[in-house]
Image (tube, helix red, strand yellow):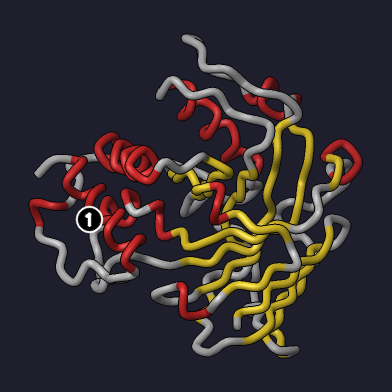
Amino acid sequence: MTESTLAAQLVHARQQHALIEELNGRDIPADTGAAYAVQHEVLRLTGARIGGWKIGARSPSAQASGAPIDASLVHASPARLEFSSFFRVLVELEIAFRFAHALPARSEPYTREEVFAALGGVAVALEIVDSRFAQWPNLAPLAQLADSQNNGALVVGGIEPYDVVAPGFDFIAPRLALSLDGVSIVPQTPGNPAGDPRELLVWLVNHCSRMGHAVEPFWTVTTGSYTGAYRVEVPGVIHGSIDRIGEIELALV
């Protein structure tokens, strides 16, 4: 099994809208490095341009992980997407960031202070979680990581200046709302498992730098769900908001 073989399967699944029905053990990437290689191989094979990233962690002390998002899958709010274009639809309300300028790859790691100082914008984001594997979610985490960490699409609200929003903003427990056809789908105790999502940005910048990639200011970086993943079974309209940042709308038709 080579990385490119799995990448080819993922490309076929996306282009033909056909699930990978069975994943053999030999198809699972050996480690995170192999999984990240598959992500970029898929982008290369499809001629895609990176338009965003999704990053996250299971707890503030856990190792972060992430995946680049094809620019064609990043949509401005209000968005209108075909429900049938996905294999499954789960939605997550998140906070996304943009950098004010490019952060080029370099030999020494970027510090937290450098990364935070480079932040330029913040927005409400709605991630659609999807998978190209029929076995999902009963699937090896490294296979999910290789498959764009289960990203299906990203909807992004208006970009607000980071230096205006950030002072006094509660990144741990912001005031938020999320509804499907007017009915709230916010869990009883919302919160990002990673804690302050800005800490994940330090990992992203250095992850890209180690791979020889500059972090670009046009990338939209979404940083993990405050509402968990809510499965949407039929077409409908999703509204979300995060106090002081903005609102978002997605019509699944």
Residue drawn 70% across the image and 43% down it? 97
Task: Give residue 38's position: percent from left, percent from top.
Answer: 29, 42
Q: Classify mark 1: residues with Cα within 10 Å, few (<14), some (14-19) or many (20+).
A: some
Residue drawn 83% across the image and 55% down it? 245
> What is the number of callouts on the image?
1
Q: Is residue 3 above or below residue 250?
A: above
Nearer-the-camera pick, 163 or 217: 217
Task: Give residue 120's position: percent from left, percent from top.
Answer: 78, 34
Residue tagged 1:
9
- What is the residue that sits farthest to the top in this orientation? 107
33 left or right, relative to 79: left
Q: Which amino acid is tagged 1?
A: Gln
For numbered disc 1, what is the local secondary structure? helix
Q: Is residue 223 above or below residue 155?
A: above
Please tell me in which quadrant of the rendered image residue 219 appears: top right
Residue drawn 74% across the image and 63% down it? 77
Task: Give residue 22's position: percent from left, percent from top.
Answer: 15, 68
The quarter of the rendered structure image containing the N terminus is top left
Residue drawn 58% across the image and 19% down it? 110
- What is the residue that sits farthest to the right in this orientation? 164
